[in-house]
Image (cartoon, rainbow, N blue to C red):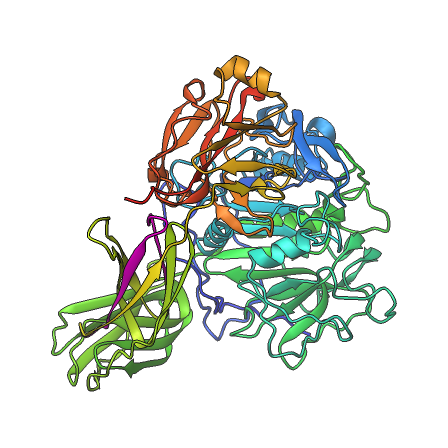
């Protein structure tokens, strides 16, 4: 099939860019080419200087027998091996490869840097030495002990805002929701993202536990927000299903369970070998494709795949990405899309999202240069069969680094349409590219009010609030793209709000099983905000009140800091957009606080799965009491550093499981069912101690803590004032001597009866 240029941006919502003038970000969306021009897909952009490439090494890339990093000077990481039966130390990458990139020459061997994909980085460094190329590639790694990835955070020296290309080669640790959002924002703002997956059950560090596989296809699918329907019987994956959602990039990796060992038609979906995977898009159909025919050479030799998964690619405007493209397919596979716009059995794909670009490959083997640590094999430029691993990967890296400028304003292709209620309305419209969403409105012109929605999107919805019933309003919608083109404005239109309607506050329910908290649930016919109050039924005691600021139909609110064994009157106030109010009152009595909590089977974890402590049978914490968790140190050794602990303070030696170890990671306390009890906390940094000052504030926000030097830690003492928070994390401390690291728990059973 002939591939024509696709200048249509993704229809999936892209977040709002935060351009920084001095950074390499701020790339632009592709401009719409004039219809008379006959361009082919993915035109190569003119070279640009100072292309910064970031190889991720924070998310388990060296777990098991892998070593998907550029270089490491140490092996501090201790990974739990697959099937959860043993641990071992592995390469731990630092920010800058050593020796320094400035020492690399054209004749430097690929093993000058000690990592399994060092040749990739070495080849880019060499390319920067060729004057005719006018490139200035700089290579960095995101280290194993770095903080969570961010976008637009000036406190992070390796914020993604500062890079052009991010390479995620076979991650084995889930990205947090915040990290995934940051990576998607990075792409939306012009960044290039390279995704390398691997075969099923390649969970090399047991990050999903013994019963659940968190391998790279699983992890990358969730990063891309895919939601593809799979089944336990044939067809395991139905590409015709209208329920499939191929995420923001329109790409989905076949993951564990999408085949069956006894099914000959499907058994090699997510684990197969093709030593010479040559079903590439022919040059006659796409002669200027820069991934297959780019500055590093011709890639028609294809890839060498050994233990690969495959992909499905969707160009569906609502459940895929119209810019998604397949460049290489399984040998013998059809290169035609099905009736749902889905291409299957793909091994190399690309897409655009916002102002940026993405490429994806189903196997890390092509990047494997046979050096480094672990069970590695010669791929890259030394694979057999005449494949072009290095050429394709380097061409793709070049393409990711150079988005074309956008000079065309968005076009409103649908709407605006209005859905109006009594005191609010929603204005909706569609643009031909991701763009901002603004509405100017008022009872007359010129407009005196404005509303907007955050981010950039193809489908736009803006809520107008604070309106008057039975009133006519005039409005105009407007959109600008991330490159600043626009605004494109709609014609002025009008709508009329309806008559006032009742709130319809239904009968609320209450859960009063906790000694120091109650949870109320209620619903309303229309969206409301409001408040919830708990007032002691007697003449003494403190009233507790919280606001419900988000307009919803179904509400749940928890009032904490209550006194055990106390009767309360609970009042719900619901307020609609017109200012109308309805209320409901009910009563509840808090039970007595338990004298202790059995922590047997509970877990203390952080976002690195190797740092997981399961509390042994018989671990008990008393009401108002402490449990101090140390590292590889008995109680006597711990007290030699920190002073005597009170006899009532419980102490647990975690062995070498609990590791603060200068690693800025948050901690979470889980109960025996795996449900969160407290956390995730704020991060604890090197040579620092964090002490909780308010147990009823979210553990993940800084106001809940104070920061001290690690020598000022106060284990077994100094808990915040009781508020009925239950068992919480109250102190975390790093130390120069790892045996003095600690995490402290406290059982806040609440204040006693008045």
Residue 192 horizontal side relative to residue 587, left or right? right
Q: Quadrant of the C terminus?
A: top left
Instruction: Tell me if residue 17 can be seen.
Output: no
Query: Going 62% across and 20% down the picture, which residue do you hit?
Result: 634
**Vertical side of 271 occupied by 314: above or below:** below
Query: Which stretch is magenta?
Result: 557-578
Q: 499 and 71: which one is in front? A: 499
What residue is shown at x 58% (from left), y 16% (from top)? 636
- Point out residue 564 in the picture as x, y percentages from the top left corner: 36, 49
Hey, which residue is sitting farthest top in the picture? 640
Q: Is residue 345 in view? A: yes
The answer to which of 731 and 496 lies nearer the viewer is: 731
Q: How many numbered discs sit on the rendered protein?
A: 0
Residue 38 vertical placement versus 422 (above, below): above
Residue 25 or 64: which is nearer the viewer? 64
Residue 619 location, x and y as percent? Answer: 59, 36
210 on left or right of 264 = left
Q: Quadrant of the N terminus?
A: bottom right
Residue 197 % position (x, y): 69, 52
Q: Is 563 covered by the magenta stretch?
A: yes
As for residue 263 lying within the magenta part, the answer is no
Quarter location, residue 111: top right
Query: In the visual, does 689 lie left or right of 168?
Result: left
Q: Nearer the viewer, residue 617 or 448?
A: 617
Q: Position of residue 647 (x, y in %)?
A: 51, 23
């Amino acid at each position: 099939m002939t591939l024509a240029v696709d200048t249509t941006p993704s229809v999936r919502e892209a977040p709002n860019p935060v351009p920084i003038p001095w950074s390499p970000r701020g790339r632009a969306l592709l401009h719409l080419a004039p219809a008379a021009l006959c361009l082919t897909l993915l035109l190569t952009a003119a070279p640009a200087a100072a292309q910064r490439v970031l190889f991720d090494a924070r998310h388990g890339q060296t777990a098991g027998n892998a070593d998907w990093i550029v270089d490491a000077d140490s092996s501090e990481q201790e990974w739990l091996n697959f099937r959860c039966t043993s641990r071992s130390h592995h390469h731990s990458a630092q920010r800058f490869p050593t020796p320094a990139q400035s020492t690399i020459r054209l004749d430097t061997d690929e093993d000058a840097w000690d990592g399994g994909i060092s040749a990739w980085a070495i080849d880019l460094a060499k390319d920067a030495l060729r004057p005719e190329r006018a490139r200035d590639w700089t290579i960095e790694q995101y280290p194993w002990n770095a903080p969570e990835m961010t976008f637009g955070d000036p406190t992070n020296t390796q914020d993604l805002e500062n890079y052009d290309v991010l390479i995620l080669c076979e991650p084995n640790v889930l990205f947090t929701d915040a990290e995934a959002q940051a990576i998607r924002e990075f792409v939306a703002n012009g960044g290039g993202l390279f995704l390398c997956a691997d075969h099923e059950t390649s969970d090399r560090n047991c990050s999903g536990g013994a019963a659940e596989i968190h391998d790279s296809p699983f992890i990358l699918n969730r990063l891309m927000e895919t939601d593809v329907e799979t089944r336990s019987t044939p067809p395991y994956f139905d590409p015709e299903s209208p329920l499939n959602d191929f995420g923001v990039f329109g790409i989905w990796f076949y993951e564990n369970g999408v085949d069956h060992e006894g099914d000959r038609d499907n058994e090699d979906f997510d684990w197969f070998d093709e030593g010479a995977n040559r079903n590439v898009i022919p040059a006659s159909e796409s002669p200027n494709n820069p991934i297959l025919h780019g500055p590093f050479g011709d890639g028609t030799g294809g890839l060498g795949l050994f233990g690969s998964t495959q992909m499905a690619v969707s160009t569906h405007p609502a459940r895929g990405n119209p810019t998604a493209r397949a460049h290489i397919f399984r040998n013998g596979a059809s290169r035609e899309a099905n009736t749902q716009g889905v291409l299957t059995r793909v091994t190399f794909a690309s897409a655009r999202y916002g102002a940026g670009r993405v490429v994806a490959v189903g196997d890390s083997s092509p990047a494997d240069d046979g050096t480094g640590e672990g069970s590695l094999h010669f791929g890259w430029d030394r694979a057999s069969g005449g494949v072009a691993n290095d050429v394709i990967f380097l061409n793709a890296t070049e393409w990711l680094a150079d988005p074309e400028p956008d000079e065309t304003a968005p076009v409103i292709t649908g709407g605006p349409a209005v859905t109006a209620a009594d005191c609010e309305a929603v204005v909706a419209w569609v643009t031909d590219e991701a763009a901002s969403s603004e509405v100017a409105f008022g009872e007359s012109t010129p407009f005196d009010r404005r509303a907007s929605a955050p981010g950039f999107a193809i489908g736009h919805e803006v809520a107008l609030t604070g309106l008057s019933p039975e009133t006519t309003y005039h409005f105009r919608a407007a959109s600008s793209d991330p490159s600043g083109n626009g605004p494109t404005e709609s014609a002025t239109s009008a709508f009329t709000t309806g008559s006032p309607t009742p709130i319809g506050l239904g009968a609320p329910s209450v859960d009063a099983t906790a000694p120091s908290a109650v949870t109320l649930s209620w619903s309303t016919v229309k969206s409301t905000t409001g408040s919830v109050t708990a007032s002691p039924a007697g003449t003494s005691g403190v009233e507790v009140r919280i606001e419900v600021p988000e307009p919803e139909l179904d509400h749940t609110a928890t009032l904490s800091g209550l006194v055990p064994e106390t009767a309360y009157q609970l009042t719900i106030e619901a307020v609609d957009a017109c200012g109308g109010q309805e209320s409901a009152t009910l009563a509840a009595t808090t039970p007595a606080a338990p004298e202790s909590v059995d922590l047997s089977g509970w877990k203390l974890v952080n976002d690195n799965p190797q740092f997981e402590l399961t509390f042994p049978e018989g671990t008990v914490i008393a009401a108002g009491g402490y449990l101090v968790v140390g590292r590889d140190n008995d109680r006597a050794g711990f007290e030699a550093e920190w002073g005597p602990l009170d006899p009532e303070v419980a102490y647990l030696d975690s062995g070498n499981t609990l590791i603060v170890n200068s690693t800025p990671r948050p901690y979470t306390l889980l109960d025996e069912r795996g449900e969160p009890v407290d956390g995730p906390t704020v991060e604890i940094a090197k040579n620092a101690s964090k002490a909780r000052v308010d147990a009823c504030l979210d553990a993940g926000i800084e106001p809940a803590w104070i920061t001290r030097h690690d020598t000022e830690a106060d284990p077994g003492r100094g808990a915040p004032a009781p508020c009925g928070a239950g068992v919480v994390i109250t102190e975390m401390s790093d130390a120069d001597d790892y045996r003095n690291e600690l995490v402290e728990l406290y059982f806040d059973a609440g204040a006693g009866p008045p």
